[in-house]
């Protein structure tokens, strides 16, 4: 693979297929010229490494696998003055005690940090359980070249993705709920599919919150639908003022709302849930809330029924508290 090959990769392919193709071409290029038991490209997410793609069968690792970060050789490589290519890792003092060396039985190692938008995105990494005839130091410039090209491809794809998100938001404008102006159920399904592709491509996680208003039917029956519509509008205002700029709020049913938060780690999701609860409470709008975070490497669609179940559990707890206030 050459710089021309990377430039010719179809970066405008749907759902980021062009970037994933570039990742696979890079790994194949390295596997052919620098044989190792495994070459992989990973995304660092908290204390996890999500494997975007991998080539090689010496280790049980494939695209979508989730590995530890702080226990890895790459973590030591990034956070200390450690060599990026090592023919016998057990002889290098700075790597002494790294858990993954024992866990996977690693002997040879090559790593390269991949940054995007001014911070670490992940690593390009080669590991081998056996000694090799090739001196890795002699091919370090080749590995550096591959890492640099991968960084360039990632940067270009992130910029393309930013533009695509703007187009997605423009399309959502035609998929809005007439009462609240929020995106509707059809838009929710569309965004869920789009964000699922993004989490696969970039290895980050997302979260889904489901919110159900309390006693909307009682308000409609007692005070009229105008009062009920006002309550729905108040809830939509709460969501607009609470979610982050990267998140999307939806009205997905009569008294039901949702938020897709991306990217969103578990700790960020806790903050979002606390913020939502406080905002609804301060606005005097009763609502049951359920939130679930995507597990690293798992489909985003899995979290929707979990968030829904947690919302119903929250609603039941509120009902029980009203029946037994003591």
Image (spheres, grey):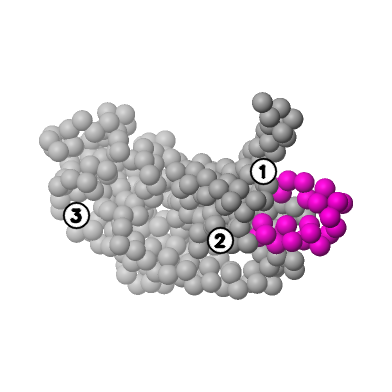
Can see residue 207? no
Q: Is residue 10 left or right of residue 14?
A: left
| Contact between labelled residues 1 and 3, with CB atoms less than 8 Å apart | no
Q: Which residue is mark 3?
A: 140
Q: Mark 1 falls on what kind of element?
A: strand
* Residue at x 57%, y 73% (from the top left corner): 167
Kindly indicate whether the residue at mark 1 contacts the one at mark 2 (C-beta within 8 angstroms): no
Report, in whole angstroms, how far the alpha carbon at label 3 lies from the one at label 1.
56 Å
Quadrant hosting residue 74: top left
Q: Which badge, 3 or 2, comes first in the chain's sequence?
A: 3
Estimate the x, y position of residue 54 in percent, counting from the top left.
40, 47
* Residue 26 versus residue 8 in the image, above or below: above
- Circle 3 or circle 2, nearest the eye: 2
Sequence-first tag of 3 and 1: 3
Q: Is residue 229 magenta?
A: yes
Mark 2 vs 1, N-terminal side: 2
Q: Which residue is mark 1?
A: 288
Q: Observer-nearest residue: 217 or 136?
A: 217
Disc 2 target residue: 241
Q: Nearer the viewer, mark 3 or mark 1?
A: 1
Residue at 37% across, 66% down: 155
Instruction: Tell me the chief SS of the magenta region.
Output: helix
Crowd class of label 1 (few under 14; some 14 to 19; many from 20; radius 10 Å): many
Q: Quadrant of the N terminus?
A: bottom left
Residue 23: image location, x then y, percent: 40, 57
Question: Taking 248 as reference, is 39 above or below it?
Answer: above
Residue 250 placed where, x, y %? 66, 59
Pick the quarter of the image with the C terminus. top right
Q: Secondary structure at mark 2?
A: helix
Q: Give how far across and how far down residue 228 sits, in percent.
A: 78, 57
Query: What segment carries the magenta color?
Result: 212-236
């Amino acid at each position: 693979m050459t710089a021309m090959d990377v430039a010719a990769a179809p970066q405008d392919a749907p759902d980021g297929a062009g970037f994933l193709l570039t990742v696979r071409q890079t790994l194949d290029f390295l596997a052919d010229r620098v044989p190792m038991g495994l070459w992989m490209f990973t995304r660092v997410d908290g204390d996890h490494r999500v494997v975007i793609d991998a080539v090689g069968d010496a280790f049980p690792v494939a695209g979508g696998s989730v590995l530890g970060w702080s226990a890895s050789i790459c973590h030591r490589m990034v956070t200390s003055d450690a060599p990026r290519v090592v023919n016998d890792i057990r002889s290098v003092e700075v790597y002494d005690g790294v858990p993954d060396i024992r866990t996977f039985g690693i002997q040879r190692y090559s790593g390269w940090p991949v940054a995007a938008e001014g911070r670490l995105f992940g690593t390009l990494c080669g590991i081998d359980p056996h000694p090799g005839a090739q001196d890795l130091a002699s091919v370090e410039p080749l590995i550096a070249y591959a890492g640099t090209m991968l960084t360039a491809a990632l940067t270009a794809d992130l910029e393309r993705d930013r533009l695509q998100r703007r187009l997605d938001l423009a399309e959502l404008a035609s998929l809005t709920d007439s009462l609240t102006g929020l995106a509707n159920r059809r838009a929710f399904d569309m965004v869920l599919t789009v964000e699922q592709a993004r989490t696969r491509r970039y290895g980050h996680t997302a979260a889904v919150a489901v919110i159900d208003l309390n006693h909307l039917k009682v308000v409609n029956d007692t005070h009229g639908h105008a009062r009920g519509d006002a309550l729905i509008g108040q809830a939509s205002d709460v969501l607009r003022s609470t979610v982050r700029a990267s998140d999307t709020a939806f009205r997905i049913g009569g008294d039901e709302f949702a938020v897709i938060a991306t990217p969103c780690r578990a700790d960020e999701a806790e903050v979002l849930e606390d913020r939502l609860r406080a905002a609804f409470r301060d606005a005097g709008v009763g609502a049951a809330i359920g939130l679930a975070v995507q597990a690293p490497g798992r489909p985003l669609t899995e979290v929707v029924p979990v968030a829904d179940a947690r919302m119903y559990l929250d609603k039941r707890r509120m009902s029980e508290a009203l029946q037994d206030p003591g």
